[in-house]
Image (cartoon, grey):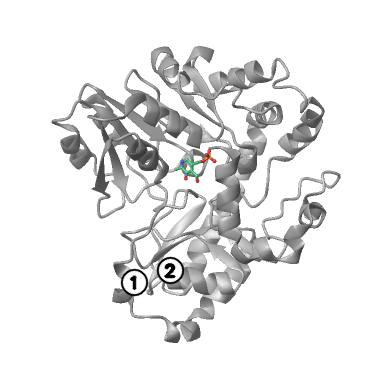
Amino acid sequence: MSSGFSRRNLLVGMGAAAASPAFASPARWLAPHDAKRAAVAATTTADGMILLSRNENPYGPLPSAHEAMRDALVHANRYSFPPDYAALVGCISKLHAVRGTDVVLGAGSTEILRMSADAFTGPGKRLITGHPTFEAMAAYASRLGTEIVPVPLTASYAHDLEAMLRAASGAAGGLIYICNPNNPTGSLTPASELEAFRRSLPSGYVLLVDEAYHHFADGFPGYAAQAPADNVIIARTFSKVYGMAGIRLGYAVATPGRAKELEKWQLEANINAVAAQCSAVAMDDAAGVREAARRIVADREDFMRQAKARGLKVIPSYTNFAMMEAGHPAPQVIEYFGRNKVQIGRPFPPMTTHVRISFGTPAEMKRFWQVWDGMKLAALSFAPAQSLAAAKYRWDGSC
Ligand SMILES: Cc1ncc(COP(=O)(O)O)c(C=O)c1O
């Protein structure tokens, strides 16, 4: 993900904020993030928009990482400041019980997805994905002339592994992308099924398991992190539990052979020196990571309680967001929330009346529910669902 790509999405996402006077002066919109202050994250934009749209961590980086970030800034004149890369790779290797040669760093796990598309897809190859799932993989593979085969999720929103296996037959191979837990549904594909699936993968295929939301599912029945194998690559990110989406850091764990194939497509010096240093500190802070996950799981439980009290249908979530039936066309609900200064997730066809809510701080969620409760009146002016159900939606590059 280049910085231009991110900036474009941010501007699109913030809409009116880009034109507001506050946006004109960096000093004004940066003020709440003043580095001299403690690790207090601000998710509300300068014009007061609450951001519940991109599955970020509203609490910001771990305090230990925040401090390391500030310390690392003095090395910003260097491409890297040894042993930063090595220290980070060392932390990742230790966590996953693999060797350094099995780790590939990316500017966000998005770069890992892009490297995988470059390495394992192309003309004559297939990409098999769930539907709906995180669209980046399909977007990258399709640019390369790959045949994209979207396989609908099951009734419990798991990946339909049998159908994915069927879809894999009769092609020269390619890539199978499984997001577990899945974005945007927040749902699990059971560990026991995944194990059998990986053993029966047809030759010529590589399975990429995207575990961006691992920490919010870890320890829950039915979930298990996957291990790398000759035909299995795991992707992880620092954008979620670590609260460092803007730092842009992700990684893959693979066998050395697969890691080399990915690295052919890696940008030189793709990790900035600040990211490398603060992420090693974050990873080493096991207690801090546990606490960050616990807090968001508690927020999730609160969200479910609030939804239940209102009789709403929410897909059980193992992530830091939830997909909920809104009873109205998603684009209208999104627009209504935007007008009320709450930015929720974009549309996720074919789920035309579901909306995806990323969990914010308790104060932000209080506001979210106030706006939700006010929707009854606004909905009187919504267009009939059928008129929007068929609307085409193109992925805007955001999470
Ligand atoms: C499943 C999944 N994978 C990857 C990403 C990209 O994350 P990043 O590039 O910030 O690591 C996201 C973003 O939300 C995601 O939902």
* Amino acid type for the residue under numbered disc 1: Leu
Q: Position of residue 343 (x, y in %)?
A: 56, 63
Q: Position of residue 153 (x, y in %)?
A: 27, 50
Q: State the residue in front, 54 or 61.
A: 54
**Tag 1: Cα neighbours inside 10 Å, few (<14), some, or many (≥20)?**
some
Task: Say if mark 1 contacts mark 2, CB within 8 Å.
Answer: yes
Using the image, tell me which numbered label, if any, was put on residue 219: none
* Amino acid type for the residue under numbered disc 2: Pro
Residue at 68% over, 42% down? 61
> What residue is disc 2 on?
331
Q: Is mark 2 within 8 Å of ligand 1?
A: no
Residue at 63% over, 66% down? 16
Circle 1 sits in a helix, a strand or a loop, which is it? helix
Gap between marks 1 and 2, in whole Å? 8 Å
Q: Is residue 22 left or right of residue 59?
A: right
For residue 240, which quarter of the picture? top right
Q: Position of residue 254 (x, y in %)?
A: 42, 20
> What residue is disc 1 on?
388
Classify 380 as above or below 150: below
**Tag 2: Cα neighbours inside 10 Å, few (<14), some, or many (≥20)?**
many
